[in-house]
Image: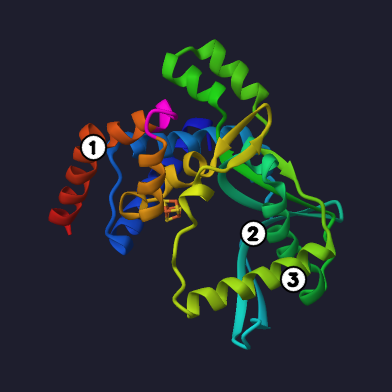
Amino acid sequence: MTDQEIESAIAEMFEQNYELLQAEGGHSLTQDTKRTALQQVMLYWRKMRDIAERVTETEVKLTLPEQQTPKGRKYSIHGVVDIVQEDERTVMYDIKTHDAEYVESNISDYEKQLNIYAHIWQNLRGQPLDQTAIIATAYPKEVKQALNAEDDVALEAALEQWEPLVNIPFDQQHVDDVISDFGDVVDAIEDRQFTPPSATHLGQQYKTKGRERRFATQICSNCDGRFSCSSYRAYTQSNRGSDASFNRYFREFDSTDQEEWLSANLEADLET
Ligand code: SF4
């Protein structure tokens, strides 16, 4: 297949996948969001083509059964990874839609999850593993700026600099910690404890390379439930004026974005 044929096939699969998710979940994307999503898929295909072509097993389902919460409930942990096996070396990849900078800044969260999958692969399946890594598919701001400016030279340079692969070391201690964390979460769900974190927590900073971002900016701004979340509302009200970019985002949503979102969902409803 030529490069163009491969990209056409990816675009077709993207569309089929979108229609399936739309039918299953009943949610639609605005044209802009859909275009951006397809652009992200295309860019990481171009960037990660070398690894994608060497993947020997995709969507490998891993299960850690018969776990017990602190309150005695039984549960299982499930995960899905991609595997590359070549020259007697086996590498496990987990694909995340976050950007590599965020993954590196919060590496312990990712270590825990991937270490669990590595534990299942090595101990329950009895297969050796030489490396584990995250593929962070969201492109960095330099790529976004070049795309917005339609500057092909800057885009080429930004793509060259982009490193979506983040290696994750294996640590058995993480396996024990994350199993214990999962148990607490299962108990909280089963006990119907869905209270969001406090507004103060939303104001706390995440460490990133060279700058800090608030939980509200990094996490809540991507959360579909934010406009009905009491903590988010309290946070935006208490921070009005001190976080100009956040308030601008909050105001912008209720005009064009909201209309597009409503139209996209109404159209989807009519189609179904
Ligand atoms: S806006 Fe979403 S992510 Fe943020 S606290 Fe509320 S529920 Fe949690």
Q: What residue type is labelled 3?
A: Ile
Tag shown at residue 81: 2
Residue 118 place in picture, x, y as percent? 76, 63
**Does 171 sit above or below residue 181?**
above
Q: In which quarter of the image is the C terminus?
A: bottom left
SS type, badge 3: helix
Quarter of the rendering containing residue 211: top right
Tag shown at residue 233: none
Pick whichever of labels 3 and 2 is earlier in the sequence: 2
Residue 3 place in picture, x, y as percent? 53, 32
Q: Nearer the viewer, mark 1 or mark 2?
A: 1
Q: Which residue is drawn at 44% across and 76% down?
A: 192
- Work out whether residue 57 can be spotted: no
Q: Which residue is drawn at 67% across and 51% down?
A: 55
Question: Which residue is label 1 attached to?
Answer: 254
Q: Give the range drawn in magenta.
A: 240-246
Q: Which residue is drawn at 57% across and 71% down?
A: 185
